Image (cartoon, grey):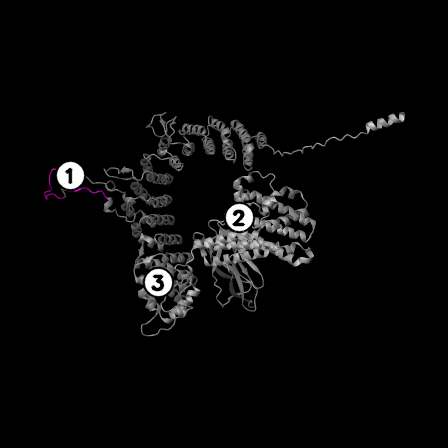
């Protein structure tokens, strides 16, 4: 019995009770940063004097403050502000309040009352000005709060009577930035003007205009700038301000006169047709004419900065009457701008005198009073010849501003362009190169309105002797678009251009291009000169010129381009001229046009293909491009061999399309490169490679690895070599790049190089996928059923699985994913570069002593290159395999037109001694970095970078270079050193 009880007791106490497992929530750690306000409070409490407090404040100003800590820091600063007696410390606190109010994300409406209260008992003028500046910052941060704006404007009006100019300046600045025209204000105290009683309800413009007559010039300047600030904010300035602004044009201080010039210009644009009276006269003129005359007078101001601003301002006043415009080119007052009395007025004055002249007394009919010349003129005499004064100014900045203003006015007035032509041509002889260059550019812009005479052309052509290459090439471009009047002008221009070619052989291409346009613009003037230019004779045979002579080629370019519009000219050609035409048509087709030469088609084949190939329009080529891409989209329905053949044929068609249609060369090359990536990916994923063991297909494995690397290189070309891409195209490029990286990861796992490298590769790939999802979040709906779309669906599983399983998933997903269709943007261009110099045609080696350097001139044209100063590099490849990469200086780049750049630089070569001459290769490279892609900026705009917690780091930046010019070979010969 006892044994039985013992057994029951053991059974009762050995029972196993299973408690359901409750998952304990993980503890979340929140990192708390030390409070900035507490640290500042401790530092300020430790300060024993004002010097220590100022040092603590200076140290605090160098540290960033988080948004959530700003309000607490402001409270601590205000608390110490009320305790502090030293002005410098309070000034620094007021400055810190202004800086803290600018903190991004902080709304300063909670500190408005405290900031306004600090003004109440402040006695220091400097601190008061700084506090008003803080209020200005707060007001600009709260543009949607009319209550705050009204309070700040009232504070500004209250302190406008302060004796310190800085306080009045800040008050006026507050009114200009925050004041409203239609809001009545109550001015508490008198300003400088006593014409209006205190307490009168007035608007902000009246209050600001009161300070146009302030005793301090800095306040007058601030008042004018405040009024201009109202205009910039879209408020219409009252017309009554015009008279006050005109009086300030004669102020003693240049800052006031400069601001007054701008104010007069603004009002003349707001009320151009308003009638204003001439002082001391009954005459009236339009406001824009009156303002033009007054600003023209300022071109003779004593300050060169005011003269520059006045000259620039004149160029934008294009509503001026022609007689006022033409008066700026003549220092003498024209008769049509002088007020004349009618015959009735003269007879009335004679009758009022009471008697006629008897002739017995000398000058008895002289006028009774001497009239001031300024009162009888419609324009001030000092304003006459304003541009003449500007073009003759001692400061080159004024001369440049006058030239630019002449250009703006001449472009809108052909008659004025003809009258100012002599003045612009005279500026070609200026002593400053920048002025000469600007004059050439200006004359080029108004060339459609002018025709050069022989004396003017002689002055223009004298500039070809200039040593500056930029000046000479700018003049060549000017001659391309300028009309001349006589055949002697053509002969003179040709003679001077040939002299230029002889003196500066590097100008060859520029001179040829210039003569091409000269001939096409003046065919009737070239026709009488053909026999003389080609040295032909009606009876005798003349010797055949040398085709290697650049001067003879220049003459032929001129004649052949003139012959295109003159069908009677080819009858004057000799037999060797036709042969030379055939040669130049093949070698310099961009300079020599196709000509219809009767009876010569069968002999020389001169009927160019260009005239027949133009039948295909750009629209049909664009349609063919779209159809080719649509045809490729059906590749999913084909077997592997047929799909590869279709891609091959489409790539070939697109390459040929780019050769035939230069307008579509960028889009065609872009599509061909993208399809080439798809073809390489398709070949790398063929069944033969993946259905066999790795030792049996080592060769195919190496081929797939090379294909993956080539795809990566091609994607960087697609992203950085083409401009005009939209976000959708960039997403497609990164999608292909992600496929190539997945292929590399799978191939790395098949070679079994070790577990640690495989784990790190898998982690890096997952980071790339997350980065792709973050950057292209808006484009994911367009990537349905793509490789990335399937990966993102499997992302939770990929993040937790082992590397081997991840590789299997990637391999399956890669082989199941199809071709992602490419959508072309509106306009796409490929970056190209053409090396003009060196030509690579010379067989004479460039000799130099080994160990020393020799300079090689580089001249290249760049098309559609973004930021060439940082991305374009020059590579020199030596025969022994050495390679040097040179980064040109920013000053070596010029921009002759939109999307076009010119690189003119020197490359220094050096090497050890060689036994015989050999060739080096010179090419241009386009440097890129994946961290500089446009995606970073677009992601920043989406705001994700504001909170970086939990976001994986981006992929390491990939840097490289892309060759985008044909290499040029140059013979060099390093000679041994003489001993």
- Sequence-wise, the earlier of marks 2 and 3 is 3
Q: CA distance from mark 3 to mark 1?
A: 67 Å
Q: Considering the numbered disc 2 on the image, is that residue within a helix, a strand or a loop?
A: helix
Q: Considering the numbered disc 3 on the image, is that residue within a helix, a strand or a loop?
A: helix
Q: Is residue 312 left or right of residue 834?
A: left
Q: Is residue 202 left or right of residue 891?
A: left
Instruction: State whether residue 49 is above or below residue 953.
Output: above
Highlighted range, magenta: 338-362
Q: CA distance from mark 2 to mark 1?
A: 84 Å
Instruction: Identify the residue position indicated by label 1 in the image.
Output: 349
Callout 2: few (<14), some (14-19), or many (20+) C-alpha neighbours within 10 Å? some
Q: Nearer the viewer, residue 830 or 530?
A: 830
Instruction: State whether residue 179 is above or below residue 467.
Output: above
- Sequence-wise, the earlier of marks 2 and 1 is 1
Quadrant of the rendered structure where residue 801 is? top right
Q: Is label 3 in contact with label 1 (beta carbons under 8 Å)?
A: no
Measured as percent of width and height from the top left, residue 576 is found at 38, 71
Instruction: Identify the residue position indicated by label 3 in the image.
Output: 562
Q: Considering the numbered disc 1 on the image, is that residue within a helix, a strand or a loop?
A: helix
Measured as percent of width and height from the top left, residue 640 is found at 59, 55
Residue at image coords 61%, 39%: 950
């Amino acid at each position: 019995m006892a044994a039985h009880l013992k057994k029951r007791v053991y059974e009762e106490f050995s029972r196993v009770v299973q408690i359901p497992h409750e998952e304990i929530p993980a503890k979340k750690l929140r990192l708390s940063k030390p409070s900035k306000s507490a640290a500042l409070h401790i530092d300020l409490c430790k300060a024993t004097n004002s010097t220590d407090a100022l040092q603590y404040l200076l140290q605090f100003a160098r540290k960033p403050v988080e948004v959530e800590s700003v309000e607490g820091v402001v409270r601590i600063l205000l608390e110490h502000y009320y305790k502090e007696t030293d002005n410098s410390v309070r000034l620094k606190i007021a400055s810190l309040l202004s800086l803290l109010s600018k903190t991004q994300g902080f709304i300063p409406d909670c500190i408005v009352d405290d900031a306004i209260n600090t003004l109440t008992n402040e006695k220091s003028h400097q601190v008061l000005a700084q506090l008003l500046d803080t209020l200005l910052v707060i007001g600009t941060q709260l543009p949607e709060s009319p209550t705050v704006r009204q309070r700040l404007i009232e504070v500004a009006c209250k302190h406008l009577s302060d004796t310190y100019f800085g306080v009045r300046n800040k008050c006026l600045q507050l009114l200009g930035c925050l004041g409203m025209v239609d809001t009545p204000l109550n001015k508490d105290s008198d300003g400088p003007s006593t014409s209006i009683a205190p307490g009168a309800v007035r608007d902000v413009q009246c209050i600001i205009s009161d300070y146009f007559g302030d005793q301090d010039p800095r306040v007058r300047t601030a008042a004018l700038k405040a009024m201009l600030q109202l205009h910039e904010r879209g408020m219409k300035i009252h017309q009554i301000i015009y008279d006050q602004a005109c009086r300030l044009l004669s102020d003693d201080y240049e800052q006031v006169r400069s601001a007054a010039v701008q104010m007069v210009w603004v009002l003349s644009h707001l009320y151009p047709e308003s009638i204003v009276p001439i002082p001391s006269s009954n005459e009236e003129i339009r406001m824009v004419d009156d303002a033009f005359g007054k600003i023209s007078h300022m071109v003779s101001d004593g300050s060169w900065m005011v003269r520059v601003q006045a000259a620039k301002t004149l160029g934008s006043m294009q509503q001026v009457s022609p007689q006022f415009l033409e008066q700026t080119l003549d220092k003498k007052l024209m008769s049509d701008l002088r007020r004349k009395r009618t015959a009735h007025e003269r007879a009335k004055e004679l009758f009022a005198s009471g008697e006629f002249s008897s002739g017995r007394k000398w000058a008895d009919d002289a006028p009774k009073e001497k009239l001031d010349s300024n009162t009888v003129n419609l324009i001030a005499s000092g304003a006459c010849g304003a541009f003449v004064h500007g073009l003759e100014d001692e400061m080159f900045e004024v001369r440049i501003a006058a030239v630019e203003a002449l250009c703006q006015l001449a472009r809108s007035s052909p008659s004025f362009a003809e009258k100012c032509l002599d003045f612009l041509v005279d500026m070609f002889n200026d002593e400053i190169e920048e002025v000469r260059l600007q004059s050439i550019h200006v004359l080029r812009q108004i060339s459609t309105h002018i025709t050069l005479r022989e004396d003017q052309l002689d002055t223009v052509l004298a500039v070809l002797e200039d040593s500056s290459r930029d000046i000479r090439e700018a003049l060549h471009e000017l001659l391309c678009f300028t009309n001349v009047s006589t055949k002697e002008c053509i002969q003179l221009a040709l003679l001077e251009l040939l002299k230029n070619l002889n003196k500066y052989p590097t100008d060859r291409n520029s001179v040829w291009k210039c003569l091409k346009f000269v001939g096409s613009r003046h065919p009737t003037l070239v026709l009488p000169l053909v026999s003389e230019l080609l040295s032909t004779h009606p009876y005798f045979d003349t010797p055949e010129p040398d085709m290697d002579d650049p001067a003879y080629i220049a003459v032929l370019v001129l004649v052949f381009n003139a012959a295109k519009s003159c069908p009677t000219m080819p009858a004057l050609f000799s037999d060797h001229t036709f042969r030379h035409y055939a040669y130049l048509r093949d070698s310099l087709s961009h300079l020599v046009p196709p000509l219809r030469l009767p009876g010569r088609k069968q002999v020389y084949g001169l009927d160019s293909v260009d005239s027949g190939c133009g039948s295909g329009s750009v629209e049909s080529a664009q349609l063919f491009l779209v159809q080719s891409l649509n045809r490729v989209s059906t590749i999913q329905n084909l077997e592997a061999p047929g799909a590869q053949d279709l891609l091959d044929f489409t790539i070939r068609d697109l390459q040929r399309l780019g050769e035939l249609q230069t307008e579509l060369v960028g889009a065609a090359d872009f599509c061909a490169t993208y399809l080439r990536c798809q073809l390489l990916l398709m070949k790398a994923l063929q069944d033969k490679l993946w259905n066999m063991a790795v030792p049996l297909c080592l060769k195919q494995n190496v081929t797939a690895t090379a294909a993956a690397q080539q795809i990566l290189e091609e994607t960087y070309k697609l992203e950085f070599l083409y401009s005009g891409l939209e976000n959708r195209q960039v997403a497609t490029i990164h999608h292909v790049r992600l496929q190539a990286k997945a292929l590399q990861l799978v191939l790395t796992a098949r070679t079994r190089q070790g577990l640690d490298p495989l784990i790190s590769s898998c982690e890096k790939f997952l980071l790339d996928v997350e980065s792709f999802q973050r950057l292209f979040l808006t484009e994911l709906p367009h990537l349905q059923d793509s490789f990335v779309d399937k990966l993102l669906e499997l992302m939770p599983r990929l993040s937790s699985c082992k590397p081997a399983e991840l590789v299997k998933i990637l391999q399956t997903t890669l082989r199941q994913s199809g071709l992602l269709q490419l959508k072309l943007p509106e306009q796409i261009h490929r970056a190209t570069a053409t090396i003009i110099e060196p030509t690579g045609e010379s067989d004479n080696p460039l000799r130099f002593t080994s160990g020393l350097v020799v300079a090689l001139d580089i001249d290249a044209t760049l098309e559609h290159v973004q930021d060439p100063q940082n991305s374009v590099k020059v590579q020199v490849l030596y025969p022994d395999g050495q390679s040097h990469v040179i980064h040109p200086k920013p000053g070596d780049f010029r921009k002759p037109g939109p999307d076009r750049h010119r690189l003119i630089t020197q490359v220094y070569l050096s090497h050890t001694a060689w036994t015989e001459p050999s060739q080096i290769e010179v090419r241009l490279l386009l440097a890129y970095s994946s961290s500089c892609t446009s995606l970073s900026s677009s992601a920043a705009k989406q705001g994700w970078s504001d909170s970086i917690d939990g976001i994986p780091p981006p992929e390491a930046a990939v840097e490289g270079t892309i060759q985008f010019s044909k290499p040029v070979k140059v013979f060099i010969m390093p000679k041994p050193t003489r001993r």
